[in-house]
Amino acid sequence: MVRALVIVVALTATAGAQSAKLFEEGRALAKDGKWSEACDKFAQSLELERAPGTLLNYGDCQEHLGHVALAWRLFDEAAQADTNVERSKFARQRADAVLLKVGTIVVKLATPNAPGLALSVAGRIAKPAAEVRELVDAGEVVVEVSAPNMQPIRKAERASGGTTIVVEIPALEPIKRVETQTTTERRPSRVVAAYTLAGIGGASLVTGVVLGIVASAQYHQQFTLGNCTEGSPPPCNIDGYNKLESAITLANVGTVVGVAGALLIGAGAVVFFTAPRDVVVAPIATPQSAGLAVVGRF
């Protein structure tokens, strides 16, 4: 037990010595006007020992860097923590002087007790309450409020020294969720190709039928006109013979065109029914959901 106590005392003394060393390094840098480097040293010193003198010097350093709200908090802490009456009074004077340079923001939360509610003022986490008062640097101040499964709220206001800004945050609303259903659709490019083949095939088939009808009419007309008589082959005069030959040729062309049309229709059917399917994710319209369809190819 005694040995453990000796170890704790030794560690405390070591931490204290290291803190004092960092403090002196910070003081030296501050004298040279190297405020950023000095602040780093004071911050490291405070991590080891939160001494009132270090708080006071760190606050002075932050004020020189323009972080007056942080400087006020450090001066205020130093004033409350220091048992030395004179130094405590000096720290309080520094805190009061800084007040003229900072702005005050009052955040009013409509639902401060909402489960998991988180509040951030000018990048600093604050404890949620019906009314939260924070000192901030002059300039744009961002207030952010969030909670699980709720729509976050972000408001930006501009603060200036010696002024007070009130920001009212209404009750957070639940996040709208989009319900979807998954279906499949044939690949559009393949569907267009199938329709094109079927369209050309259909036109060709109709053309073939029309040519066949015209050829048949021309063929039988020769018997009506008396250019040919029944027989096998039918005897015809010169004009009738030529017209019969023309009708037969036209009929053959119609047959070829019609058969080609039928084949194209068949090819279009094959292309359509063998087309790959794309997965389509579409929203289901509900009073609580809204969104856009998302199409993906897999």
Image: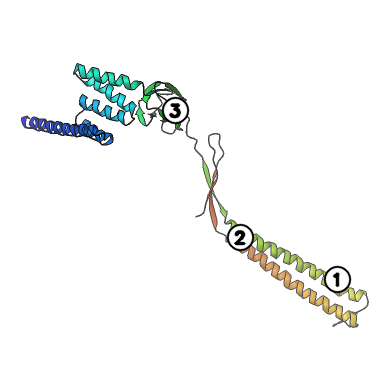
| Residue contact at pointers 2 and 3, CB within 8 angstroms | no
Identity of the residue drawn at 54% across and 54% down: 278
- Please identify the quarter of the rendering in which residue 5 is found: top left
Residue occupying the far right of the picture: 226
Q: Position of residue 185 (x, y in %)?
A: 57, 53
Residue 294 horizontal side relative to residue 7, left or right: right
Q: Position of residue 107 (x, y in %)?
A: 42, 23
Observer-nearest residue: 147 or 106?
106
Nearer the viewer's eye, disc 2 or disc 3? 3
Residue 272: assigned label? 2
Q: Report helix, strand or loop for mark 1.
A: helix
Identity of the residue drawn at 87% across and 81% down: 241
Residue 219 horizontal side relative to residue 204, left or right: right
Residue 21 horizontal side relative to residue 64, left or right: left
Q: Report helix, strand or loop for mark 3.
A: strand
Identity of the residue drawn at 69% across and 62% down: 199
- Residue 236 in view of the camera: no
Residue 217: assigned label? 1
Q: Gap in Å between the C-alphas at discs 2 and 1?
A: 38 Å
Q: Gap in Å between the C-alphas at discs 2 and 3?
A: 63 Å
| Residue contact at pointers 1 and 3, CB within 8 angstroms | no
Q: Report helix, strand or loop for mark 2.
A: helix
Q: Say which residue label 3 marks.
A: 158
Task: Give the tally of numbered discs.
Answer: 3
Q: Residues within 10 Å of mark 2 (few under 14, many from 20)?
A: many
Looking at numbered disc 3 in the image, what kind of residue is underneath it? Arg
